[in-house]
Amino acid sequence: MSLSRRPGRRALSRLCGAAAVLLGGGGVIGVGCGQEPPVGDVAPPPLGPQDDTDACECAGGFYYNNQPIPLAETRCDTFVCGRDLISYQCLDGDTAADTWRSYPENRCGDLACPAEGTFCGEDMVNGEPAALYQCPGAGQIPLEWRICPGGCEDGACTGEASGECPCETPPIPGGERIPVRCGLTLCMPTGVGGAGVKQVCTAEGWRNLGLACNQPQGDCPACRGVQGSSGREITTTACGAEVCGLGVGNQSRWVCGEEGWLDLNLPCDPGASNGEAGAALGRCPVEFRDNDGQWKPVEPGQTFCGDQVFGGRANKDLAINLGELDLRIHGRADRLYACPGPGARPVPYRDCGGRGGSGACMRVREIPPVRWHEAIGAHPGANEPKIRDWDRCDESCPPVSDAIHYFPTYTNGGTLAQCEHVFCGQDVITGRVGTLYHCAYDLVSANYTCPPVSDTAVVGRPVPYEECPGGCGLRDLTKSSDRCDAHSEQQPHGMPDPTPTPSITSTCDPIVDYQGNAVPVRSLRIGSQVCGPGGQVLACDERQLSRPDGWRATGIPCGTSCGVCGPDPYGDQTPVCAYFADAEGLACDDASFAQSWNPCSNAPGVRINTPAYCGHSLPGIDQGDPNMLYVCKAYCPRWEGGPGHMAPCEGSEGLGGGGVPRTRRYFLDHTVYCALGCQGNGAAKSDECKRPGGGKRAAPIDDSRVIRGFGVVAEDYGGRHLGEDLVRSSGGTAGAEVHPVADGRLLWKGFNGSQYLGVALVEHPPKDGTGERYCSFYGHLDVDGLAPGLEAGQNVTTDDVLGKVVRWDDIPSLHNLYFDKKWTECPDSSDEFTCYGDGRTDNSHLHYTVLSDAECRRFAGSSSAPYGYDECKTPDEDAVALTAMKAADGCTKPMDGATTEGYVSPTWFIEAPPQ
């Protein structure tokens, strides 16, 4: 037997979690492994005696079953499941009144008990590993729970971590000589193949870390969904990652493994480690201070000098989550370390000594900012964005050799101007991947020859030259310099290999729980149990022909949904449930509803089938949590096929009227957490969660101004402008993020052969399904990062990013990467394109317009783009939509069948949106 899965309590509780089906007639039938469920420790009081140190009086509390919580039973730091199925904690108010604190994102409706008594989290369905739960019965939601300061064993808190772990002698050569201790990580054989797996010694013995011995990093999704000792959600799912404390008040060390968080039974010691690879080097930051003084997010693979501490709010929050005093990279100050990601272990990259420079490592915040082509004497505007850079070595440029050639450039008069080579970062030199660095010889010491023939020629240091909108393309250094290339596959040093996709046999298909919420990824692994549709526990088992998605109905009731014996995802019931469903009519009836707190209204004016209410505007009863949306459902009496029962109403069923009595009743169906708050819509319409964009309409670039308006005649383009050109009010426009002007749906994104380059089209449907549909079009977008993470047909909000404004003079070179017809590249202008790199004002801008429904249909099926100008000479600057082209207006020809009426003023659309 592999040491990775000894038959411990966790495995037994999941595989043989025998429970009782509680029937309406009071009968109890044992199911599962043929035995009664384990009896919890029921010594009174279940969660320990209440003394002066934990006596709190939190008033006004209710259990999930609508029973009030007596003041005598409230304890400091104890959690309860409220009647809106979210967690509340009783907090000591010190000199003020004790009070309940809600955790809207910490739902408790998916918790299910194995029996009556007290149980540790690992014996619960979806329990927290370090929590002790008081359970009223099998399949029910626990009444209350508290976080143990150490671990939880055999239905009781274990106290502080003892450092004792029952780990057997490892079955590896010399294993009997290894001092086994808590937190020890070893490579164990599996009997299959030669790689082996990494295992760690825990409070339950050896457990898998979810990594092969030759796999440096990996993802363990079972570690999602828990809180740290600070009360914040732990976001890391890296296999082998450690945290200090699971839950408020817990002070034990835990490690992320294949089964989730594993108890090391060791006390917290911020910064300490169990020997994890790279732990001695500290942690990578979330954000860093750049050389413009701003805090910015760390890029994948970004390099940092050693021996530095990272301030900033995000870094401090991550340090708290990881149980460390601060976020720092140890190591030597004259060495570079690569960061695979926030909170990851740094990877040694480069020693700065012996590289022709001072041997020091330069921190980016101390490197003077450089802008586009300043290295060769260009004079970009003061508002131009600086070129992104990373910590790098103070090094000399690589000299001419058999492997590296330098190339001459000349002035207009034919004089040698530069003897240069341009390198991608981390190609021979250090620096940022995605940035080009300029290297050049001192022409005086090179006797004005290139490549230099003098041994005394002096080569300079790398200087940021250009930031690539896509990737940086590596070239044969003997034949040409590196250059920007969107198809480049260069990866930063230290980035891990892609994590292998888990086998389909190790997980079950995604499903929803009994509340209609998606089951989290951590609960889709074999051995997991969830409270599923119909109010019964579903177990994730091996897939079979009869269960292709892997889910098996156990018949164990759970949650508060109606129908204690509902069907499984295939419409089947266990034989016991099927029998009693037929005999007793087990379905949604008054008895099953009466146990739940009901925030719904049964007033005659409520006529829709699924009304929803914000917690701060519940109809006529006590208020709920203001961040929750309570969704109700109408039920109507049915008598067909057996005893009378309640079933979801269809259409206008049960509304009554015309002498027919109203028979429908409303009950809570599920709750939704509103991350941005809940929006009340009055009695005529259901409340709803506030959308990320808030339904607003705004200019696509923040802090922007129009430089060429709608309907203005532009002589250089021969007609009226069919949109608006937008630039930033301050700072350079190239690289500015572009957002949709309103919520809608992305129709398409792509590349266009005109000067538009990157384009996107967004549909904006009418409010409440009435009125006219409009679309918004965006042009002059960068090809790199075009609508990142968004696909055609996907809903978008004003917070989504459609792309970034492309640098104007980069358009020809980027055009040539994707289209067969080649353009002359800047700085040389041509008939197709006018460059602005000769000292004139930068022309980087966004062109956007709004289209009517008819015009939108012309462009919705392809990546062709609307016209930018028509052929009319008569301006119409105040128009909502431009008038048709007429000969009297100086229009020389139609626009291939397009009608100018289809182009709508973007400013009008934003400021006076149609209803």
Image: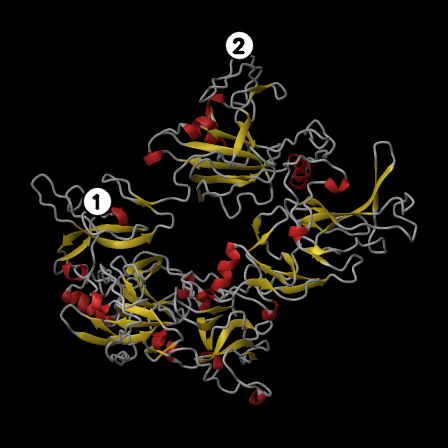
Question: From the viewer's perspective, is 863 left or right of 572?
Answer: right
Q: Amino acid at mark 2?
A: Ala
Residue 514 visible in image: no
- The structure residue drawn at horizontal position 57% and vertical position 32%, both measured from the top left corner, is 727
- Above or below residue 881? Residue 752 is below
Q: Which residue is mark 1?
A: 651
Q: Which residue is mark 2?
A: 888
Based on the displayed image, in which of its 4 quarters is residue 45 positioned? Answer: bottom left
Label 2 Cα crowd, 10 Å radius (few <14 / some 14-19 / many 20+):
few
Dot 2 or dot 1, earlier in sequence: 1
Q: Position of residue 632 (x, y in %)?
A: 24, 51
Q: Position of residue 254 (x, y in %)?
A: 46, 72
- The structure residue drawn at horizontal position 44% and vertical position 41%, both measured from the top left corner, is 797
- Above or below residue 463? Residue 164 is below
Question: From the viewer's perspective, is 361 left or right of 207?
Answer: right
- The structure residue drawn at horizontal position 46% and vertical position 66%, both measured from the top left corner, is 504
- Above or below residue 22? Residue 464 is above
Q: Amino acid at mark 1?
A: Gly
- The structure residue drawn at horizontal position 35% and vertical position 30%, both measured from the top left corner, is 915
For the image, the number of numbered tags is 2
Based on the displayed image, in which of its 4 quarters is residue 301 positioned? Answer: bottom right
Q: Position of residue 338 (x, y in %)?
A: 64, 60
Residue 702 visible in image: yes
| Distance in Å between CA atoms under marks 2 and 1 | 58 Å
Based on the displayed image, in which of its 4 quarters is residue 894 positioned? Answer: top right
In what element is the residue under mark 2? helix
Outermost residue, bottom direction? Answer: 176
Given residues 660 and 578, the one toward you in this image is 660
Q: Are marks 2 and 1 in contact (CB under 8 Å)?
A: no
Outermost residue, left direction? Answer: 659
